[in-house]
Structures are given as structure tokens and as C-alpha cells.
């Protein structure tokens, strides 16, 4: 259970309802997921986080499946079960296949392993990596 509980639409004040309405309209859904309902206890955080997510995940140089897979990779590295579930669903909706998921997790696992090894061995950065 969320630490402070979840704020449902019916129980939300006008500021929270406005963000919920924007989430529904932007995502073309009638569903507000638990993440938003949990952080709605602090409307400025809800609004700021939604505006940032909406901007970052909007169409750009990266396609939607790439953005969702990047979000999923970071979520896996940070061990956020909620975000793994949420962004796996979003990545699948954007076109991620089972094979893509498996390969992504292989890359995440390898990156985490080699990052720890490089950090543990305190490997100096090669000069050629520092020039453009």
C-alpha cells in the first residue's frame, strides 16, 4: 500500500483533477495509474512530474519504443518494480517484442556488471574516449 494512500479522482481537489484530466487526455485513456494517485498528495510534485514526463516522453528524435525501453532499462537498474511493470507495458504497447525485452535485459545486466567492475578496479578513462 502506498505510504499515504491513493487519491482517487472523486476525492481529488481541483488542482489534482486538472492534472488527472490532462493525463487522461494526453494518454487517451480513462485510467489514472497508482503512481499519479500516490504523488497527488503533494499537488506541486504531481503537476511538475507530469509536465516533465509529458515533455520528455513526447515525440522527438527518439521513437516511442526507444524512449520506453530506455526508461525500462533505467528502472531495472534502479530496481523500481513499479516502473519496470509500467514501462514494460508502455514499451510493449509502443512495439517492444519479447525478443527486444530479453536483449534489453541482457544489455542492462552486462552494463551493470561492467560498470561495477570498472568502478571497483578504478579504471582510468582512455584518452581516446575524451576527444570528439
Image (cartoon, helix red, strand yellow):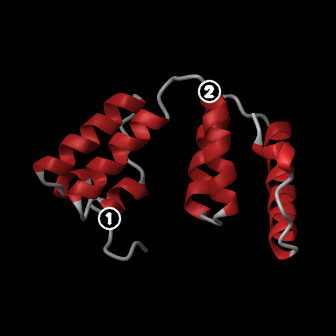
Relative to 99, 68 lies left or right? left
Task: Tell us which disc is closer to us: 1 or 2.
Answer: 2
Label 1: which residue? 6
Residue placed under numbered mark 2 in the picture: 62
Which residue: 19% across, 52% down? 10
Q: Residue at x 27, y 43 (%)?
A: 20
Q: Nearer the viewer, residue 73 or 11?
A: 73
Q: Please provide percent x and percent y for residue 73.
A: 69, 51
Which structural element holds mark 1?
loop
Q: Residue at image x 34%, y 35%?
A: 24
Q: Earlier in the sequence, mark 1 or mark 2?
A: 1
Q: Local crowd at mark 2 within 10 Å, few (<14), some, or many (≥20)?
A: few
Tell me: 59 left or right of 108. Answer: left
Relative image position of residue 32 (x, y in whole percent): 37, 47
Give percent across and percent down for residue 131.
77, 39
Residue 16 position, x and y percent, is: 20, 50
Alpha-carbon distance for marks 1 and 2? 33 Å
Give the image quarter of residue 77.
Answer: bottom right
Mark sitting on residue 114: none
Quarter of the picture containing the C terminus is: top right
Out of 87 and 127, give the one closest to the viewer: 127
Amino acid at each position: 500500500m502506498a505510504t499515504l494512500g491513493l487519491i482517487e479522482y472523486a476525492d481529488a481537489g481541483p488542482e489534482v483533477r486538472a492534472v488527472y484530466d490532462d493525463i487522461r487526455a494526453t494518454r487517451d485513456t480513462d485510467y489514472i495509474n497508482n503512481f499519479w494517485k500516490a504523488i497527488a498528495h503533494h499537488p506541486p510534485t504531481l503537476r511538475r512530474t507530469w509536465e516533465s514526463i509529458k515533455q520528455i516522453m513526447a515525440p522527438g528524435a527518439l521513437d516511442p519504443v526507444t524512449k520506453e525501453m530506455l526508461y525500462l532499462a533505467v528502472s531495472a537498474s534502479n530496481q523500481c518494480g513499479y516502473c519496470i511493470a509500467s514501462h514494460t507495458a508502455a514499451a510493449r504497447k509502443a512495439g517492444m517484442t519479447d525478443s527486444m525485452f530479453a536483449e534489453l535485459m541482457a544489455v542492462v545486466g552486462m552494463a551493470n556488471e561492467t560498470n561495477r567492475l570498472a568502478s571497483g578496479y578504478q579504471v582510468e578513462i582512455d584518452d581516446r574516449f575524451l576527444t570528439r
